[in-house]
């Protein structure tokens, strides 16, 4: 049996998502630096004191290797999605190809088979403008697709959670991924549709839970946990990776 508990470490001012995972098969304490968290695997009989001492002894190693991992992730995030001819939807890369045509307008065509996209660019568009034109039409498509996906998930989870929302709008919020007003109006950040589906589900559940609790009390998080048991991991994913959800 495996049991896990998620929290945050603060080492020299650096906040690190941290998970303790008890595993009956483990014979000793071990540690793994992942891209979105530090995980400590713990034998069933290990005490809290042993775990704390293990983390304390290794805190310099943890910080050093966590920062190395984040540096690698930052370098990867700085690569241009558009120059790589792919962009993410629900965490999965959607490849696209461009064609220069005699059409008068920029058009995008999505193929369900193979989950790929073809974008047709008018021959009259100067090459130095291709990047910005591609970004604009892909963002428009992502917003439309995102609205469709979020709407479906809001309808599905609101029934499951026995809550009713009023309206839903897709927005671009610089510092927030979502919000819910006292009138039951829900806003979600369109960029979140590029995150893995588990993160998208968490965001929807989080905002719908505010229809029951307009705060972040223990009761609120317990309600969220009924429908998203690993909400802490999804929340931490956004903290670590949220800035990479963009079209460069």
Image (spheres, helix red, strand yellow):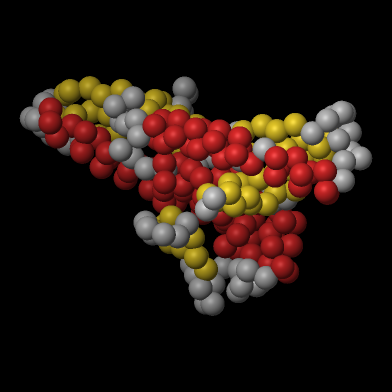
Q: Is residue 92 above or below residue 160?
A: above
Q: Which of 151 and 88 is in front in this view?
A: 88
Q: Position of residue 55 (x, y in %)?
A: 71, 42
Say which quarter of the image contains residue 105.
Answer: top left
* Residue at x 60% of width, y 59% of height: 206
Q: How many labels does the image show?
A: 0
Q: Where is residue 94 in the image (x, y as percent from the top left)?
A: 42, 29
Q: Which of 128 and 28 is in front in this view?
A: 28
Q: Is residue 41 above or below residue 228?
A: above
* Residue at x 51% of width, y 73% of height: 181
- The answer to whether one can see residue 73 in this image is no
Q: In this view, does 186 lie to the left or right of 20?
A: left
Q: Which of 50 and 196 is in front in this view?
A: 50
Q: Position of residue 12 (x, y in %)?
A: 54, 50
Q: Position of residue 125 (x, y in %)?
A: 11, 32
- Please state, as top left, top right, bottom left or bottom right, where the N terminus lies in the image: top right
* Residue at x 32% of width, y 43% of height: 139
- Please state, as top left, top right, bottom left or bottom right, where the C terminus lies in the image: top left
- The answer to whether one can see residue 185 in this image is yes
Q: Is residue 16 left or right of residue 131?
A: right
Residue extending farthest to the bottom is: 182
* Residue at x 41% of width, y 41% of height: 244
Residue extending farthest to the right is: 45
């Amino acid at each position: 049996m495996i049991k896990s508990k998620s929290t945050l470490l603060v080492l020299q001012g650096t906040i690190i998502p941290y998970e303790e995972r008890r595993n009956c098969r483990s014979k000793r304490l071990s540690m793994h630096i992942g891209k979105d968290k530090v995980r400590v695997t713990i034998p069933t009989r290990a005490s809290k004191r042993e775990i704390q001492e293990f983390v304390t002894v290794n805190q310099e190693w943890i910080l050093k290797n966590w920062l190395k991992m984040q540096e690698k992730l930052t370098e990867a995030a700085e690569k241009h999605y558009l120059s790589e001819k792919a962009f993410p939807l629900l965490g999965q890369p959607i490849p696209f190809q461009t064609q220069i045509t005699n059409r008068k307008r920029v058009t995008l065509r999505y193929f369900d088979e193979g989950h790929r996209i073809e974008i047709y660019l008018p021959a009259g568009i100067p090459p130095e403008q291709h990047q910005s034109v591609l970004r604009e039409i892909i963002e428009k498509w992502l917003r439309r697709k995102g609205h469709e996906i979020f709407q479906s998930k809001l309808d599905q989870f609101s029934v499951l959670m026995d809550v009713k929302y009023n309206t839903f709008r897709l927005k671009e919020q610089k510092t927030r991924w979502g919000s819910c007003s006292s009138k039951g109006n829900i806003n979600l950040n369109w960029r979140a549709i590029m995150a893995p589906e588990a993160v998208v589900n968490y965001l929807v559940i989080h905002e719908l839970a505010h229809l029951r609790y307009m705060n972040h009390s223990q009761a609120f998080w317990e309600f969220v946990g009924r429908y998203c048991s690993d909400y802490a991991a999804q929340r931490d994913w956004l903290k670590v990776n949220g800035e990479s959800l963009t079209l460069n």
